[in-house]
Image (spheres, grey):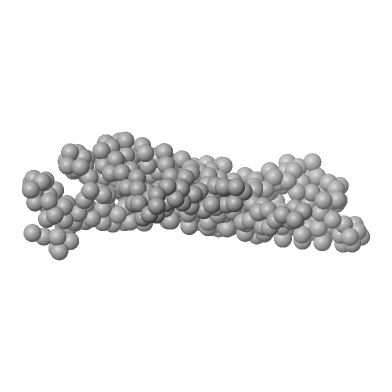
């Protein structure tokens, strides 16, 4: 329910509805109540309308029901915007809420354009890591849940603010150094010229070491690793390889810069690192993560609301379930056979740290399937006990038998 968009008018809870310039928080209910001498009649009609809408959903096919859920999900853009910070802005006598978004680094008068371009590439994963939720929002809701998605989005936005705060600290330190060099003690960031930044760079003892250390201060290693995979199609073997790869990028930046002859550095060449290009296993893993996530969402959908679903739908769900579980397990086995390093890198790239490795994904997916099966067979048995004349006992037995043979059904569900 938390993942569905709030239709305020339908639920009689329109916060912006007014009558005679007065806000009416429950206008629909109020009108129903006032239409009768006894307000209880209006309340009963309101509840009947809501109940009728719920009963109508029982006659939708699974595809129609799935479509209705997708069309009424709380938009991912709204889930994201809810996690943005806001501040009060005084406009005359009014106080307005202004949303503050952590936007990507685009420019700074304290850095050259070439430095900013490199920073943008190395921080790209920080500002594009909501892409996974946007592209497979429904599947994510059905597998990890709406609250987990909202929490993860909140963490991502927090990381963006932390990165921008570190960027501000780095540029502030540069401004302090430029003030000392130029003798302009009151110089502001916005008034700093390119010539003054170039003068600062010429005075730095080691321009490679300085900019390299600034990058490491601004961007965490985990995000640097993912940005390198995303932008340069390279997988680094260790954290040290990540920092060395970044150093090589910095070295090449100044090596090819027009100021090269005027800059100071102790480095004479790039550093040899242990890395590899994105492999075939990496691409296979990405494809498998996508397929398994989609199938898990379908499985979760088919194992919910078993107690209330129509009989013909129940039969179809069991048929699908008998096909889905073996298919997911086969794909998990295919994933397990892939190279660990490539599959782990693909896992971090695809799930944005929802899962931390291939093994973590396989273990948690197996537990999720087991729990979905557990809930499904439990609800089937409860349904049969409540409606013994419905004739689903054979379905219960055949489904339970398969679960028991795979040794996944808890003992308390045994006959």
Number of numbered labels in the structure image = 0
The residue closer to the viewer here, 138 or 225, is 138
Question: Where does the image place residue 209, in percent across and percent down from the top left?
Answer: 70, 57
Figure quadrant of residue 85: bottom right
Question: Where does the image place residue 284, in percent across and percent down from the top left?
Answer: 38, 40
User: Residue placed at 22% from the left, 45% from the top?
Assistant: 309
Relative to 238, is 316 above or below? above
- 393 to the left or right of 408: left
The reply to whether residue 68 is in sight is: yes
Figure quadrant of residue 68: top left
Residue that lies at the very extreme toward the front in this rendered image: 37
Question: Where's the C terminus, which quadrant?
Answer: bottom left
Question: Where does the image place residue 159, in percent across and percent down from the top left?
Answer: 58, 57
Residue that lies at the very extreme toward the bottom in this rendered image: 412
The reply to whether residue 271 is in sight is: no
User: Residue placed at 46% from the left, 48% from the top?
Assistant: 31
User: Residue placed at 32% from the left, 47% from the top?
Assistant: 48
User: Residue placed at 59% from the left, 51% from the top?
Assistant: 22
- 183 to the left or right of 244: right
Residue that lies at the very extreme toward the right in this rendered image: 183
The residue closer to the viewer here, 177 or 21, is 21
Question: Where does the image place residue 405, in percent across and percent down from the top left?
Answer: 12, 53
- 44 to the left or right of 320: right
């Amino acid at each position: 329910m938390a993942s569905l968009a709030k239709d305020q008018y339908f639920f009689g809870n329109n916060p912006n509805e007014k009558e005679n310039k007065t806000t009416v928080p429950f206008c629909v209910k109020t009108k129903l109540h006032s239409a009768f001498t006894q307000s209880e009649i209006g309340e009963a009609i309101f509840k009947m309308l809501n109940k009728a809408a719920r009963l109508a959903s029982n006659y939708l096919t699974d595809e129609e029901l799935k479509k209705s859920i997708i069309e009424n999900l709380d938009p991912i853009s709204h889930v994201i915007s809810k996690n943005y910070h806001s501040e009060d802005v005084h406009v005359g006598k009014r106080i307005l809420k202004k949303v503050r978004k952590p936007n990507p680094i685009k420019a700074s008068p304290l850095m050259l354009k070439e430095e900013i371009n490199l920073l943008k590439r190395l921080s790209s994963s920080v500002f594009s890591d909501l892409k996974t939720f946007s592209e497979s929002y429904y599947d994510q809701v059905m597998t990890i849940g709406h609250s987990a998605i909202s929490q993860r989005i909140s963490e991502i936005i927090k990381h963006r603010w932390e990165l921008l705060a570190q960027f501000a600290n780095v540029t502030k330190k540069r401004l302090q150094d430029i003030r000392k060099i130029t003798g302009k003690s009151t110089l502001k960031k916005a008034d700093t010229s390119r010539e003054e930044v170039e003068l600062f760079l010429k005075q730095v003892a080691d321009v490679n070491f300085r900019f390299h250390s600034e990058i490491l201060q601004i961007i965490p290693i985990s995000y640097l690793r993912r940005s390198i995979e995303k932008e340069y199609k390279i997988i680094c073997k260790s954290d040290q390889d990540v920092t060395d790869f970044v150093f090589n990028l910095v070295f090449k930046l100044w090596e090819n810069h027009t100021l090269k002859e005027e800059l100071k550095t102790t480095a004479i060449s790039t550093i040899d690192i242990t890395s590899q290009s994105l492999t075939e296993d990496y691409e296979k893993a990405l494809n498998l993560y996508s397929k398994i996530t989609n199938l898990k969402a379908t499985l979760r959908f088919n194992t919910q609301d078993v107690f209330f679903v129509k009989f013909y739908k129940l039969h179809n769900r069991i048929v699908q379930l008998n096909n889905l579980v073996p298919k997911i397990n086969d794909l998990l086995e295919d994933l397990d056979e892939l190279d660990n390093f490539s599959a782990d890198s693909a896992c971090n790239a695809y799930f944005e740290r929802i899962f931390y490795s291939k093994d973590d994904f396989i273990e948690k997916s197996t537990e999720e399937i087991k729990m979905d099966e557990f809930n499904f067979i439990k609800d089937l048995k409860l349904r049969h006990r409540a409606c013994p004349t419905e004739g689903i006992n054979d379905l219960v037995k055949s489904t339970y038998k398969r679960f028991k043979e795979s040794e996944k059904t808890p003992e308390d569900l045994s006959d």
